[in-house]
Every structure is written in C-alpha cells, then in structure tokens.
Image (cartoon, helix red, strand yellow):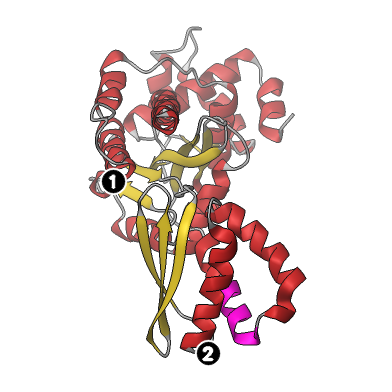
C-alpha cells in the first residue's frame, strides 16, 4: 500500500468528499477552490466555516495548498497522485473520440511513419494537449551492410533490409580508420548478418567479438563496436519521437519558459531513451505528475503514456499525451489506452500480412 493510498484510507467520508470536490473543480477550471463554492456542491449540508476547517486539515496533510493569499485551495502534486490512484473515475472514450482515432487507421497503404504521424495529430486535437508517439524500431532481417568513409571524422553505414528498405546513417568512426579496416568490418558483419534483425545481430556479434577478437585488427574491432553502439542507441534513426500540438501547451495560463524547457528536454536524445524506458515496465497506462517523471521535472507538466505491442506481445513503441498537471485525467487516460491498443492491433495485422 502506497503512502497516498494509506492516507486516503485514513480520511473520513467528509474529508474525502471535500478533497475530491476540490480536485475535480480545479481540474475543470484551473482556479483555486474556496469553501463557499463547496457549500453549494457538498452532499451533506455544511457551513463554510466547517469546510474551511476540513480544508486546513487537508492542507496540513500535504494534499492541498494555497497558491496565494486567498481562501482558495488547489491540490498539491501528492494530492493529485492520491486522487488519480484512489478517487478518479474513468469512463470509456466517447464515440466521437474513438471515431477520430479510428479514422487515422483508414489508409492501409501508407507507411507506419505516416500512420503514427496521423495518430499523433489526432491525439493532440482530441485532448488539446501535446501528443507523443514513439515509433517502433525497424526489426526486419538484414540483407547487407556497408561502411563508406565520408571524411576523417565522418562515415556512413548503409543497411539494406530483407523487406527492401534501405537506411543510411552517418556516424563518427574511431580515429585512424582506413578503407581496408572498414571493408574488414563490413565483411565480418555481412558474414553473420543475413536473416538476422539488428537486435539479433547485436547479440550475435557480442559473442563473436569475444570468440574471434584475434581475427580482427584493433581498428576494425573498434569500428564494429562503435557501429553497434550507434545502432542500439535509443533516439537515433531506429527510433523516432513524434511530437504534435506544442501550441496547445501555450495558452492564456502558459508559462513560455516552462514550455520551452519541456521541449528542450524532449529534443535531447537521452530523454527519448528515458521515454521508452517508461513503457518497458509493463503494459497499461501510466501517469506521471510533475516531478515524478524526471523527463518533465522542470516543466511542471504531466504525462499520460501507454505502450503498444506487436503480435508477439512485445512492447515496440508508445503513445502519450502531455499537458499541465490539471489534465482531465479521467478523460485522457482511456483515450491514450484506446489509441495504444488500436495502434498495436493495426501494426500486428500488418506484420501478419
């Protein structure tokens, strides 16, 4: 049992109702909630003075706070977490929201990138937040690999996949590479690459380098290892984070510096890796409020994210919505969940074809 769950269990019915109504009103309006407002909505007829006393107790517990000198209260981050975990009511997505997401799946001829771009745009439009879509890695078997020297500090790796796709990636090779060491590295990789995906190749090469290091000169070995690090680095060409709806985060209450901080975070590749790691801990929607998620800890924002899976029930990407901490969680959680399931089913169906 978490600290918040225990705290919720310890509240009496009156305190629980006052707390729930404060949070619901704040999520709807974004404004501090006063005791006089609550006297009109409570199921039990209570005086404003009585409600004020309850709100003071909730503030003492760390669930409510006073943003400025006024009688109004807003939920703290801990209070929002307790509400989300213990009191929030989640309904099914309404028909209009489901239809808007389903409409993005209509064109079966488009590639996965275009499909997920449309999903991101739809999510942003429906939720009035910014959407995040992490696209899946390309896991088709490899047909051929080639290294091309571009300059002393730049090289190109060409990957030809069995499904016909070709990817070109520029990287910085270890110092001292020669055309012959690059050819040797490419020959080494091609000897074992055919029929394997990049993930499978990485594991195989790790074993081969250990067993056959004496067969490679030092520079070729460095090149292979550098190439591996490049291919597996989350945030490089294999994985792409699609962001849609940034302007939705800059409204009348928007703090431009906060939003800039948020997207500076998003654009750093290491944070894309962290975003994926959020989804690797299991299926289902996860909610990160404020500083709970280090990716957005400086922005005061919340993230609702859900992984999607392929036909083998393996997590291959994620969809999410980011916005202010006063997100309408009860509406957005089922939308994100529904979208992730729909994307997973669509991509699994394509894989079978």
**Residue 178, above or below 103:** below
Residue drawn at 52 percent across, 48 percent down: 276
Where does residue 145 sit, x and y in percent of width and height?
46, 66
Residue 233 shows in the view: no
Work out how far the residue at label 2 is from the one at label 1, CA to CA, in angstroms: 39 Å
Q: Nearer the viewer, residue 294 or 255?
A: 294
Q: Which residues are magenta?
A: 217-225
Where does residue 38 sit, x and y in percent of width and height?
42, 19
Identify the mark at residue 244; answer none if there is no mark.
1
Q: Please state, as top left, top right, bottom left or bottom right, where the C terminus lies in the image.
A: top left
Q: Is residue 223 magenta?
A: yes
Quick check: 107 left or right of 129? left
Quick check: 133 left or right of 189? left
Image quadrant assignment for residue 114? top left
**Residue 284, above or below 219:** above
Tell which tag, 2 or 1, sits nearer the viewer. 2
- Labels 2 and 1 touching (C-beta < 8 A): no
Identify the mark at residue 175; answer none if there is no mark.
2
């Amino acid at each position: 049992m978490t600290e918040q769950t225990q705290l919720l269990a310890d509240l009496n019915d009156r305190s629980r109702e006052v707390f729930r109504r404060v949070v619901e009103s704040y999520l709807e309006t974004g404004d501090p909630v006063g005791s006089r407002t609550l006297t009109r909505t409570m199921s039990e007829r209570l005086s404003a003075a009585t409600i004020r006393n309850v709100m003071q107790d909730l503030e003492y517990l760390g669930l409510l706070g006073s943003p400025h000198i006024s009688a109004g209260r807003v939920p703290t981050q801990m209070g929002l977490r307790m509400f989300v975990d213990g009191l929030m009511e989640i309904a099914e997505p309404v028909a209009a929201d489901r239809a808007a997401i389903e409409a993005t799946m209509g064109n079966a001829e488009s590639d996965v990138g275009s499909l997920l771009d449309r999903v991101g745009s739809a999510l942003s439009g429906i939720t009035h937040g910014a959407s995040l879509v992490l696209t899946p890695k390309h896991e088709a078997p490899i047909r051929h690999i080639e290294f091309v020297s571009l300059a002393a500090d730049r090289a190109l790796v060409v990957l030809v996949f069995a499904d016909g796709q070709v990817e070109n990636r520029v990287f910085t090779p270890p110092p001292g590479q020669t055309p012959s060491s690059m050819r040797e590295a490419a020959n080494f990789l091609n000897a074992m690459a055919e029929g394997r995906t990049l993930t499978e190749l990485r594991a195989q090469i790790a074993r081969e380098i250990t067993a056959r290091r004496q067969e490679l000169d030092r520079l070729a070995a460095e090149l292979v290892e550098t190439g591996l690090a490049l291919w597996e680095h989350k945030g490089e060409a294999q994985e792409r984070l699609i962001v849609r709806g940034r302007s939705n985060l800059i409204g009348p209450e928007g703090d431009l510096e906060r939003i800039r901080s948020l997207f500076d975070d998003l654009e750093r590749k290491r944070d894309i890796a962290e975003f994926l790691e959020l989804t690797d801990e299991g299926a289902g929607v996860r909610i990160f409020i404020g500083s709970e998620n280090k990716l957005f800890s400086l922005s005061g924002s919340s993230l609702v994210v859900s992984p999607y899976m392929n036909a083998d029930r393996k997590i291959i990407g994620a969809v999410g919505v980011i916005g202010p901490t006063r997100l309408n969680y009860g509406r957005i959680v089922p939308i994100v969940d529904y979208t992730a399931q729909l994307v997973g089913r669509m991509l699994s169906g394509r894989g079978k074809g």
